[in-house]
Image: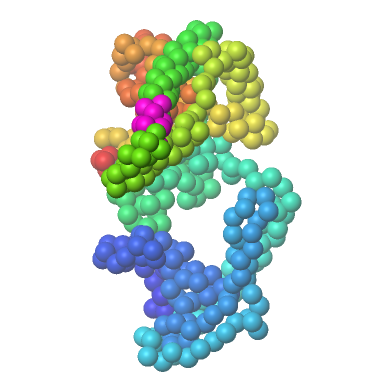
C-alpha cells in the first residue's frame, strides 16, 4: 500500500496466492482498507507494530431487532499494551502508510463530507433499494452478487472487488431493467396466468398437506406404542418383577417419547387446501406491478412489486461478445411452470425458472419463455457496447 498499490489490487493478489482472509474467507478491498479511526483492516492494525489495543468498541442491543450493534469508544478509553515480540512492521513503513492515507483523505475530503451528510439524512428515512433490481441479480458463474460498480452498469462483485470470478461481463442498468420488465409484463397480465396460478397453488398445497398429515399420523402411532411399553414396565415393577435392565429400557423409551412429543409440538399446521383469496391476491400483485411500470417519476413502487414476484435473476455470460443471458426465478413463476410441465420452448431473451409452491418449498427446473411460443425464436439477447473478454459459465 505504501508503494502505491490499491486495497483492491492487494486483495486480488492475496486471493490468487491462496492466502486465507479474515475468518477463512476471501479477501476484499475493505479487509485491507478497513476503517482508519476504528483501527480495522490490515493497514490499520497496530498489532503489527507491537502495540495491542483494547476497548476500541462496546456493544449494545438494538431493541428493534435484538441484534448486537457495535459502537466506537473515544480514544481516551482505549487501553494500549506493548507487545514487542509480535512486531512485524517497522515504524518507517507504518508511518509511510499513514502518510499515504492522509494524502488520499485530503484529496477526497469534499466527497467524504458529502457522503457522510447523505448518510445522516438516511437515518431519518426508510431504507429502500438503491435501484429497481438491487439485491436480485446473481452471477451464474460463481453464485455471488451482481451490483452497480458504476452508476449505470452492473457487474459481478466477486470479479470486481475480489478477483475470485472470471466473469468480467457487465450489463447496463437500463438494458437489464427493460428486458426483465418487458418479459414480466407480457407473461403475467393474462387471465390464464391467474387461473394457472390458483390451480397449481391448490395442487401443491394439497400434496404438502397430505405429506404432513401422513407423517403426523405415523408419529402419533409411534408415541402410543411407546406409552404402552412404559405402562407395561411400570406395571411389572409394581408387581415386584423389577429387573436391572428395566432402568435402561425405561430411559430409552422416555427419550424417544420426548423426541416425538417435541416434533409433534413443532410440526407445521395444515396450509389451506385452497387459499380463499389467492386469485384476488395474485390479481392485485399483477395490477400493482403493471401500474408501477408506467410510473417513470418514482421507481420505488415498481421495485416493491417486483420483489413480491421474483426471487432472483441469474445473469450468465453468453458465447457471443458482450452477450448476457438472464434467468428469472421466483415463487409465482414456479407455480405457472408447474401447471404446464410439458411446455417446451427455445431459449428466450429472459427465461424463468420455477421455485414452485407455498413459501418456495419445491424446486422445479426447466426454463419457460415469456410471451407466445412463436415469439421465442425472435428473442435475441441484447449485446452490450463495452468490449469484455469472452467468459464461459460455470
Residue under the point 48% across and 13% down: 202
Along the viewing direction, whichever of 65 and 185 lies nearer the viewer: 65
Q: At which x and y percent is residue 241?
A: 32, 39
**In the displayed structure, would residue 92 be above or below residue 179?**
below
Q: Can you tell which quarter of the image residue 137 is in? A: top left
Along the viewing direction, whichever of 12 and 311 lies nearer the viewer: 311
| Left/right of residue 110 with respect to residue 274 in the rendered view | right
Q: Magenta segment, principal secondary structure? A: helix
Q: At which x and y percent is residue 361?
A: 42, 28
Residue under the point 64% across and 59% down: 61
Labels in figure, total: 0
Q: At which x and y percent is residue 350?
A: 40, 26
Can residue 326 be spotted in the picture? no
| Left/right of residue 270 with respect to residue 345 in the rendered view | right
**In the displayed structure, would residue 117 be above or below residue 243?**
below
Question: Is the N terminus in the top left, top right, bottom left or bottom right quadrant?
Answer: bottom left
**In the displayed structure, would residue 394 be above or below residue 104?**
above
Can residue 91 be spotted in the picture? yes
Q: At which x and y percent is residue 225?
A: 37, 27
Span colored in magenta? 224-234
Question: Is the C terminus in the top left, top right, bottom left or bottom right quadrant?
Answer: top left
Along the viewing direction, whichever of 309 and 216 lies nearer the viewer: 216
Residue under the point 58% across and 68% down: 108
Q: Can you tell which quarter of the image residue 281 is in? A: top right
**In the displayed structure, would residue 272 be above or below residue 262?**
above
Please tell me whether residue 226 belongs to the stretch shown in magenta.
yes
Q: How is the model colour-coded?
A: rainbow
| Left/right of residue 72 with respect to residue 142 in the rendered view | right
Residue under the point 34% across and 46% down: 247
Please tell me whether residue 25 belongs to the stretch shown in magenta.
no
Amino acid at each position: 500500500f505504501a508503494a502505491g498499490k490499491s486495497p483492491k489490487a492487494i486483495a486480488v493478489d492475496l486471493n490468487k496466492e491462496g492466502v486465507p482472509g479474515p475468518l477463512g474467507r476471501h479477501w476484499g478491498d475493505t479487509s485491507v482498507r478497513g476503517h482508519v479511526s476504528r483501527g480495522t483492516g490490515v493497514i490499520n492494525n497496530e498489532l503489527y507494530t507491537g502495540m495491542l489495543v483494547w476497548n476500541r468498541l462496546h456493544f449494545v442491543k438494538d431493541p428493534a431487532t435484538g441484534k448486537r450493534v457495535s459502537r466506537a469508544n473515544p480514544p481516551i478509553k482505549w487501553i494500549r499494551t506493548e507487545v514487542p515480540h509480535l512486531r512485524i512492521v517497522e515504524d518507517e513503513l507504518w508511518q509511510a502508510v499513514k502518510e499515504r492515507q492522509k494524502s488520499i483523505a485530503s484529496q477526497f475530503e469534499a466527497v467524504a463530507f458529502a457522503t457522510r451528510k447523505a448518510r445522516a439524512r438516511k437515518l431519518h428515512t426508510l431504507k429502500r433499494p438503491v435501484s429497481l433490481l438491487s439485491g436480485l441479480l446473481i452471477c451464474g458463474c460463481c453464485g455471488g452478487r451482481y451490483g452497480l460498480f458504476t452508476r449505470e452498469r452492473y457487474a459481478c462483485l466477486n470479479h470486481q472487488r475480489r478477483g475470485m470470478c472470471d466473469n468480467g461481463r457487465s450489463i447496463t442498468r437500463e438494458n437489464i431493467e427493460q428486458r426483465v420488465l418487458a418479459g414480466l409484463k407480457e407473461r403475467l397480465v393474462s387471465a390464464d396466468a391467474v387461473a394457472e396460478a390458483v390451480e397449481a397453488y391448490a395442487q401443491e398445497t394439497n400434496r404438502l398437506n397430505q405429506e404432513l398429515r401422513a407423517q403426523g399420523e405415523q408419529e402419533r402411532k409411534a408415541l402410543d406404542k411407546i406409552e404402552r411399553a412404559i405402562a407395561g414396565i411400570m406395571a411389572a415393577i409394581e408387581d415386584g418383577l423389577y429387573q436391572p435392565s428395566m432402568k435402561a429400557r425405561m430411559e430409552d423409551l422416555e427419550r424417544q417419547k420426548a423426541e416425538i412429543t417435541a416434533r409433534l409440538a413443532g410440526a407445521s399446521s395444515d396450509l389451506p387446501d385452497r387459499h380463499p383469496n389467492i386469485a384476488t391476491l395474485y390479481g392485485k400483485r399483477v395490477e400493482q406491478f403493471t401500474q408501477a411500470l408506467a410510473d417513470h417519476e418514482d421507481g420505488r413502487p415498481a421495485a416493491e412489486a417486483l420483489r413480491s414476484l421474483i426471487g432472483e435473476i441469474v445473469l450468465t455470460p453468453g458465447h457471443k461478445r458482450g452477450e448476457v443471458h438472464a434467468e428469472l426465478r421466483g415463487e409465482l413463476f414456479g407455480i405457472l411452470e408447474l401447471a404446464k410441465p410439458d411446455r417446451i420452448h427455445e431459449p428466450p431473451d429472459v427465461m424463468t425458472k420455477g421455485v414452485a409452491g407455498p413459501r418456495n418449498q419445491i424446486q422445479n427446473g426447466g426454463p419457460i419463455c415469456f410471451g407466445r411460443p412463436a415469439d421465442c425464436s425472435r428473442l435475441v439477447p441484447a449485446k452490450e457496447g463495452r468490449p469484455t473478454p469472452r467468459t464461459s459459465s460455470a
